[in-house]
Amino acid sequence: MEEHLTPERIVNSILMDSSYKGIYLLVEGKKDIKLYKRLVVEDAVKIRPSFGKYKMRTVYQQLTEKGFSRKIGIRDSDFLRLSNNPKFDPNFIDSIFVTDCHDAEMMMLEQGCLLDFLAVISDEVKVRDFEKVHKKTIKDLILDNLYNFGCLKLANKRFSLGLVFKPERVDGPILKLDKFICDKTWKYLGHEKMVQAARDYSNNKSKKIASKEEILEKLLVIFGEKHAVTEIVHGHDSAELLRLISKHGLKADSRGLPDSDCVENLLTMGFDLLKFSKTQLYAKLDAWEKASNVSILRPVA
């Protein structure tokens, strides 16, 4: 399968394409192609997935070592910009650029794609009534609830707690958010329910899972650091919670939203050049264009 391609094979395929004289844009995965191909000049850029940010860094470095300069990368920020992150290098000079928020989906939500999504799957009156009942915007409901989950993921990453958040297979069952977020009141049900749901999901997927007490202790450490919400919340989780709100809260036709991937596709369709041009990512790419004397970004109408 393509995702098992080694960095060496990706590098060789780029170097062997000697007839192409344009720029290679390295992205993390195939979903990123759907997003960025609409924002760059097709004839000037070839988008190549590296299947992970670590592979991307290796591919970029190996191309540099071989004297190949016609490449840039775009990756999700993930937890990179969090304070006290030893991996963050303010003097990083490689042309690998990161998303404004935790990932591309969160960047889309911040740039107004949520409103476009709601206009397609529901209507203004239903959205207004729903937000009036819950005394929060749908965006705030998503961010407030999922900040807790994002903090748990960060605690797991930093303290090696043994939790697993992704299915073993692409079509495998996901960790259900309604285990710790009520799908009627849309309120967070507490740390203990979230941790228990994560531990239950991780059974038989992880060699060693930390005790509930240790996980709760480390979770409180992360909460005490008070990180920015948009740097913590994951876009895929936001898409899944948005799907649940659309289905159970707004009573949208669930046949058109069978999974979070469909939600992400609709958000991507709403992320046009005008929205993209308002991001920090666009500004960095624009500056790179000017410094490199090349044109890869489509002009904003």
Image: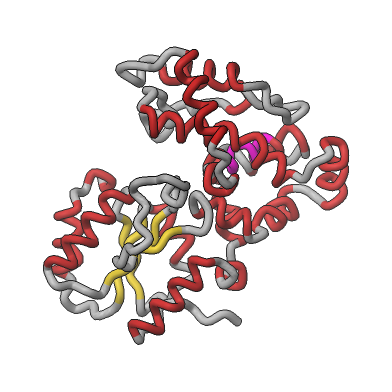
Q: Quadrant of the N terminus?
A: top left
Instruction: Between residue 45 and residue 164, name the one nearer to us.
Output: 164
Q: Position of residue 158 (x, y in %)?
A: 39, 33
Q: Main secondary structure of the magenta part?
A: helix
Please give the name of the residue rendered at 85% of the width and 47% of the height, measured from the top-left corner.
128
The colouring scheme, among rainbow, by chain, secondary structure or one colour, is secondary structure
Q: Quadrant of the C terminus?
A: bottom right
Q: Position of residue 42 (x, y in %)?
A: 40, 75
Instruction: Between residue 276 and residue 251, name the one nearer to us.
Output: 276
Q: Position of residue 83 (x, y in %)?
A: 46, 47
- Would you place residue 256 above or below residue 195 in this image? below
What is the quadrant of residue 132 in the picture? top right
Q: Is residue 253 left or right of residue 173?
A: right
Please give the name of the residue rendered at 84% of the width and 39% of the height, measured from the top-left corner.
135
Q: Position of residue 164 (x, y in %)?
A: 41, 26
Instruction: Between residue 105 and residue 292, name the one nearer to us.
Output: 292
Please give the name of the residue rendered at 14% of the width and 55% of the height, measured from the top-left corner.
8
Q: Is residue 212 left or right of residue 300?
A: left
Q: Residue 179 in magenta?
A: no
Q: Residue furthest toward the bottom? A: 293
Please give the name of the residue rendered at 61% of the width and 72% of the height, measured from the top-left corner.
274
Tell me which segment is drawn in magenta: 238-244
Q: Is residue 3 left or right of residue 220?
A: left
Numbered-mark total: 0
